[in-house]
Amino acid sequence: MKTKRITFRLPKEVTNPGDDSRSFLYPFSCVDLDLVGTPEEARVTRDHRLIVTAANNRLSAWGLSSPNLVKVLFEIGRRDLGGVVKHGALKGEHRVLVSTATHSVVCPFDPDRIKSPEGLVMEVEEQRQIGFK
């Protein structure tokens, strides 16, 4: 089984003017763990984009400051992304929508317990595929 190493970079807000939501980009790179530290690591490392969009009705209910919102949305997106990587379905861009359909009026995480996205490294083991694709 392959394990992927994901390293996040500095997030930034990418909300379009007039949207009834806020969107944040969490850029990251991904490489097979067994290639970390090898001469070919830079050549095989790929850049990706995680974009998490939260509807304004979730934002007002949660009442978070901007720095805490960045952290909570990152945690939501990071967990979703982990599942995508685990199933071997990572694409160049992954989007997560946070709305009343996906999240309750209560903020799902304590932002004080979430590490800053920038520089965070996570490793995800891909599940073995059985049969043909």
Image: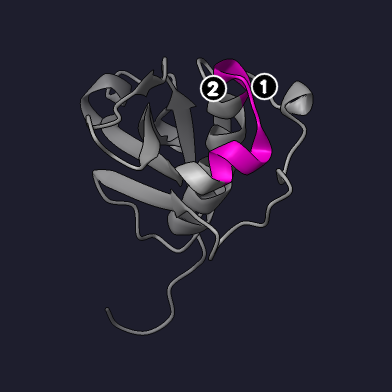
Query: Magenta segment range?
Result: 58-68
Task: Return the residue found at the far bottom.
Answer: 131
Q: Is residue 61 magenta?
A: yes
- Residue 82 position, x and y percent, is 53, 49
* Residue toward you, 75 or 18: 18
- Residue 2 position, x and y percent, is 47, 51
**Position above or below: 111 against 91:** above
* Residue toward you, 87 or 33: 87
* Residue toward you, 122 or 100: 100
Q: Is residue 77 magenta?
A: no
* Left-right relation of 111 to 94: right
Label drawn at residue 133 = none
At 64% from the left edge and 43% from the top edge, which residue is drawn? 61
On the rendered image, what quadrant is the C terminus found in?
Answer: bottom left
Q: Label 2, on which residue?
A: 117
Q: Label 1, on which residue?
A: 115
Q: Give the CA distance from mark 2 to mark 1.
A: 6 Å
- Residue 19 position, x and y percent, is 28, 39
* Left-right relation of 2 to 63: left
- Residue 2 appears in the rendering: no
The image quadrant that residue 114 belongs to is top right
- Residue 126 appears in the rendering: yes
Task: Name the magenta segment's main secondary structure.
Answer: helix
Q: At label 2, which amino acid type do we have?
A: Pro
- Name the element at disc 1: loop
Q: At label 1, which amino acid type do we have?
A: Lys
